[in-house]
Amino acid sequence: MAVYTRVASEDIATFLERYDVGTLRSAKGIAEGVENSNYLIETSKDRYILTLYEKRVDPADLPFFIALLDHLAERGLAVPPMIADKNGEKIQTLAGRTACLIRYLPGISLTQPTAEQALSAGRALGDMHLAAEDFSMQRANSMGPESWHALAEDIGADALQEISPGLADVIAITLADIDAHWPADAPKSPIHADLFPDNVLMLGDDVTGIIDFYFSCTDIRAYDLAVTHSAWCFSEDGAHFDKAISEALLDGYFSVIAREPQEFAADRLTLLARGAALRFLLSRAYDWIHTPPDALVTRKDPMAFAHRLAFYSDPARANIFAA
Amino acid sequence: MAVYTRVASEDIATFLERYDVGTLRSAKGIAEGVENSNYLIETSKDRYILTLYEKRVDPADLPFFIALLDHLAERGLAVPPMIADKNGEKIQTLAGRTACLIRYLPGISLTQPTAEQALSAGRALGDMHLAAEDFSMQRANSMGPESWHALAEDIGADALQEISPGLADVIAITLADIDAHWPADAPKSPIHADLFPDNVLMLGDDVTGIIDFYFSCTDIRAYDLAVTHSAWCFSEDGAHFDKAISEALLDGYFSVIAREPQEFAADRLTLLARGAALRFLLSRAYDWIHTPPDALVTRKDPMAFAHRLAFYSDPARANIFAA
């Protein structure tokens, strides 16, 4: 949304001297990503993104993100790796923040993807899961199911009731189902965990970039599919489900990833999708009550994901994940 | 500072179809200009700035700005003209806002210009005044001396006292001197009226762009020099005057513009500079009391220009504008 840390152009020019990237020609603070400060950099050689990490990204996690992006880029995936400086260093400090210079990718972030675009996104998610299979580093999912009980308690039943009457009960029921049935023993591999349309760059119907890996972690890949489904297949407010987008996204994914009957069973995907909806409902509810209405950051309505959770929890919808 | 109006990438892509500029490849909201919403646009042909005008720019003024920019660009000046669509139209509507597609210029906005850069900026200001001499359209200076009494009254003596004890008196004394001595009958021509360092794009010591003409108007060109002087020759907080920058800026300007003894007399420039300092002191004080401290826009400290006003009002400083 906004540039939190302002860096003087002169300081960016000096910073770039650490790299073999040419000289600075333009630096514009860009309103991208709610978590970090970003500058679109043009040099005499190329374009880059300069990211300064604000409080939500733990610098200790950067080696995992960097290695995963390198791994995927080496396998030809359109992801933005961090650039090494002349000494081979990728993690820097600038203006008191941990900072990285990152490859620029063309493409536009969609607001209302078409079915053709969802097909491409599903395929790109599958490609990423395939290419990441032999990536060996591990990072626990800090926003995974183990965290949801504590997050719900932290928000508190009163605050949830204030957001919407009955919401605390819905969350309690969902958490009980997740405790009872979550496939916690399923194999885990690298997942993106936050593949909303604004994290997919496209030109026409082609994916030109998968970006914003700052929630990527080691978890169940079917859960990543469920997260992506919850992010792509509804109107922004969660009120409308788009069947054509849903079918295209799943078709795209399963054109790359073999549909193992147990791994992608409809009832398992439904539960994972309820978990995905709950994850964003909880994080948005937390931000909602901790962000003043007039703050710099736009608050995202948690009810948009409460509606998705209700949708996935409706037995009449059980067929959406049927093979 | 921030993107106020968010436009979906799909809507930008459709908008660009009105123009002969190729197809959209990237659109990033940029944190540039406190007054408008700006997107840095990349198409299959070139790069552009898309500006949506927020409340501070009156769409009725756009024809003056557009014609002036065309006039200067035709004479080879590095300014960003508005692009005409396939029907020759330059003023559009997008997302409920008046909007223009504008030529992109490379270059970085300086935070701490050097004397060499101030020399170039002074020369660029002179070049602009020369090239604009035969521009015939007129626009009154809405932020000129005629407006300052009303603005001071609107802010109110109490609010001024609260910003700094004695400030209301300083303003009253300055206004009295301006009323008595302002060269209101001097010839008027097109001026930029807001040439702060962040409105000058540079590569090394070369000016690659003069931007943000949204205060440009028909007024005394020596006043434009005084505005630029007040903007460039002090530390941001107004506490420190930089003599080397001042001399370089004036040298650059007078390498292009003949130094007519009456037009650029030291005592006249001093009064114009006091006016320039007062103009920004008043507009900042107005914004200061009308902007909540936690608002989206960063408030600029009016005292930074109160210090400049004190500097220019000090008889011991009378020599800075001496030929």
Image (tube, coloured by chain):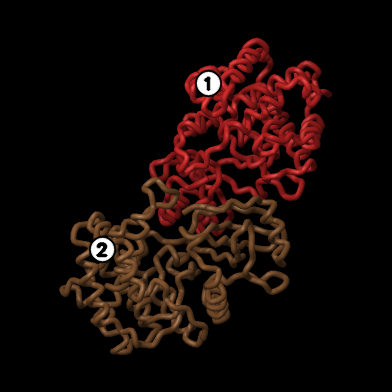
Chain colours: A brown, B red
Relative depth, front residue between B41 and A267: A267
* Rendered residue at 20%/66% (across/down): A169
Residue A168 screen position, x and y as percent? 23, 64
Q: Nearer the viewer, residue B108 or A54?
A: A54
Residue B139 shows up from this direction: no
Query: Which residue appears farthest toward the bottom when viewing the image?
Result: A261
Q: Position of residue B198 (x, y in %)?
A: 64, 42
Q: Is residue A131 visible?
A: yes
Amino acid carrying mark 2 in the image? Ala
Front one among A207 and A33: A33
Question: Where residue A152 appears, x then y in whole percent?
Answer: 30, 66
Where's residue B20, x and y in %? 52, 51
What kind of element bears circle 2? Answer: helix
Q: Chain of mark 1?
A: B
Label 2 sits on residue = A306
Residue kind at label 1, given as amino acid type: Ala
Which quarter of the rendered picture does the C terminus of chain B lie within?
A: top right
Residue annotated with mark 1: B152
Q: What is the distance, in whole Å, between disc 1 and disc 2 at their CAs?
A: 51 Å
What's the residue at 30%, 68% (across, down)? A277
Secondary element under disc 1, as helix, strand or loop, is helix
Question: Which residue reaches farthest top?
Answer: B180
Q: Is residue A145 above or below residue B75?
A: below
Chain of residue at mark 2: A
Q: With A182 as the anchor, is B321 left or right in this view?
A: right
Return the residue found at the far left.
A316
Cβ atoms at labels 1 and 2 below 8 Å apart = no
